[in-house]
Image: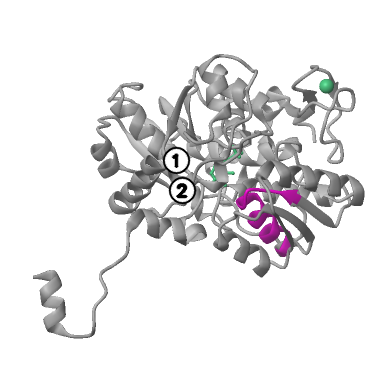
Amino acid sequence: MKQVIGARCTLCGCSVPADPEVTVCPKCGGILDIEYDYDYIRSRLTKYELMDRTDRTMWRYMEFLPVEGIGKTPRLRVGGSPLYKADRLAAEIGLSGNLWIKDDGQNPTASLKDRASAMAVVKAEEAGKTIIACSSTGNAASSLAGNAAAAGFKTYIFVPSRAPKGKVAQLMMFGATVILVEGSYEDTFRLSAEAIDHYGWYNRNAAINPYLMEGKKTVSLEIAEQLGFEMPDYVAISVGDGCTIAGVWKGFKDLYAAGFIRTLPRLISVQAKGCCPINTAAAAHTMDWVPQEENTMADSIAVGVPRNPVKALRAIEESNGITVNVSDEEIMAAMRLLGRTQGIFAEPAGATGTAGLKKAVESGLIEKGASVVSVVTGNGLKDVANAIKAAGEPVSLPPRMDKLLEVLG
Ligand SMILES: *Cc1c(COP(=O)(O)O)cnc(C)c1O
Ligand SMILES: [Zn+2]
């Protein structure tokens, strides 16, 4: 893997060789960050060579990833999600600049998390493990279970008992051993960490395992390529643990360092009002975040004790980012807007980035003429109960024309 220099600790700054089994700093326990040799990447790949590739999955960006290859093991098709020009949505929220929606709910298990899980399976294989475990608010779990099932791995999954039924159904269908933890996500994470230590399973906990962010960053590589390497002014994304926004930023920074793009977008970090520890710290320009309660319908980002605050806060700061917190009502309004104006069905956390963008435009936080990509991170079918809550119930009537006429007029 000539493109990878090593893994640098985000806390003490020391550098260690990149090894799939070493997922935290051996000296201080800090989270690691994979470092690349950009001159080497540049010598191996140009924009034009990349654009000629026929592989539409996330693995088309192999030179930017910490893997040698993906072997012959069967894989799900991860990545290659559409980037839609969203003119009607832009008009509705008062944005006169270009707006695109990156619909990452169109991954195989219906969330952006597939990008991380696909990477986790490859790294587990490299580490010689056959059992992978993780704790998750739901989507990391269902995506790990699906991607592992495709490759023939066994999974142990820890989710809080509040996880929406659609996500639990996915887990059961993919044959995972599922432990529903009666407690918060924080409790769930703690139990999974103890169990992983005890049994020696491969650890797919995204904040701890630096390779997963490398998988997530492929969403940015795709956005850049889909826009012909001309960056928008802003990228809006929902934030829970913070790994996704950190991955998004890493992807853009990698492209910039390798000379593929000339400017970097500013990040719009969107959290739920009822659970916004990262945005609260970011807005105060401090790394000293404070735990919060998990008070939002957007279960995927209801993370009171974020597991990747350092990388997330640095990403927001470095990008000269903007923080926006939205209420559950604003999230539901964004779900309806995405559906009605663009035909995109998002789960609550999937629409949260768009809710934040709408609020940022309406409150004058960003210029009306700005160009923006808003990432939809998860599909609405995962959480039908909240979708109905947001969209309402249909009319219901007996199979008689007179009744229909009464209703439709
Ligand atoms: C996990 C997730 C997020 C947030 O990602 P973090 O890495 O936890 O910040 C946002 N939306 C959806 C749908 C998710 O599943
Ligand atoms: Zn360290």
Q: Amino acid at mark 1?
A: Thr
Which residue range is magenta in the image? 134-149
Residue shown at 72% from the left, 68% from the top: 175
Q: Which residue is mark 1?
A: 352
Q: Secondary structure at mark 2?
A: helix
Q: Residue at x 54, y 33 (%)?
A: 47
Residue 147 covered by magenta stretch? yes
Residue underneath mark 2:
348
Q: Residue at x 45, y 60 (%)?
A: 385
Front-lying residue, 404 or 242: 404
Question: Which picture quadrant has residue 324?
Answer: top left
What's the CA distance linking mark 1 and mark 2? 6 Å
Ligand number 1: quarter of image: top right
Ligand 1 within 8 Å of the CB at mark 1: yes
- The prevailing secondary structure element of the residues shown in magenta is helix
User: Considering only vertical position in the picture, is 84 above or below 147?
Assistant: above
Crowding at dot 1, Cα within 10 Å, few <14 / some 14-19 / many 20+, comes out as: many
Instruction: Name the amino acid, label 2.
Output: Pro
Q: Which residue appears farthest toward the top when viewing the image?
A: 285
Q: Nearer the viewer, residue 297 or 309?
A: 297
Residue 52 image offset from top left, x and y in percent? 54, 44
Whether tag 1 and tag 2 are in contact, CB under 8 A, the answer is yes
| 146 sits left or right of 219 in the view | right
Between 117 and 170, the residue placed more toward the observer is 170
**Residue 315: % across, % down:** 58, 23
Residue 336, horizontal then vertical, whole percent: 33, 50
Vertical position of residue 399 compared to residue 277: above or below: below
